[in-house]
Image: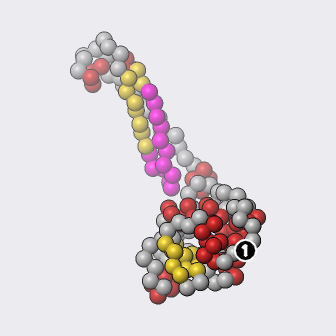
Amino acid sequence: MKTLHALVLTGALVSTGLALAVSVVRSDAIAPSFFGSKEGTTIAQPTVAPITVAQSESTVAPVGTLPPITTTSSTAAIALAKHLKRVGAKMYGAYWCPHCHEQLQLFGQKAVAQLPYVECANDGKNSRPNLCEAEKIEGYPTWKIRGKTYMGTQSLDELATASGYKGSRSF
């Protein structure tokens, strides 16, 4: 019998997390009749790694909230975030938007706490959809800085220039 390998993937939704087990199984461990031979009847059983609630809480944000920011803020990023707040700039976004998360990751955890962020998703935490509609927000993220609109993820250097930031640019 020719050697045949099968990749066995099994996914299981457990609580709020997804567990995936991957196994490489030799052909002689799988029922050869499955592959057209009448020899043997043993079938390999894939396994599913369970996820506990404690494990899923560390990686999954509660519904309606932004995913956790995992990057570290530079001193310059924190100063820029404070400056943006001081000049009245606003970032409009949605908790489920991957580009918004990417934008916030550029700032880092401590700087994000200083950012003037407006949640636009109706089911988002502290949502302000009426403000987003009044500001004619059509996509996320959208920045409003000094009367101008900037759509999409902006580099910290671009935000510094748009807002007139004069501090360090060692982002």
Q: Is residue 127 visible?
A: no
Q: Is residue 170 left or right of residue 31?
A: right
Residue 51's place in the image compared with 142, above or below, is: above
**Looking at the image, residue 18 lies above or below residue 87:** above
Residue sitting nearer the eye, 43 or 59? 59
SS at badge 1: loop
Q: Give the range drawn in magenta.
A: 12-24
Q: What is the chief secondary structure element of the magenta stretch?
A: strand
- Name the quarter where the C terminus is drawn: bottom right
- Left-right relation of 131 to 68: left
Q: Which residue lies furthest to the top in this view?
A: 1
Say which of 124 and 71 sits in front.
Answer: 71
Q: Does the magenta stretch include residue 15?
A: yes
Q: Which residue is the site of mark 1?
A: 166
Picture coordinates of residue 55 (x, y %)? Answer: 60, 50
Q: Viewed as shown, does residue 169 lie left or right of 63?
A: right
- Residue 7 part of the magenta segment: no
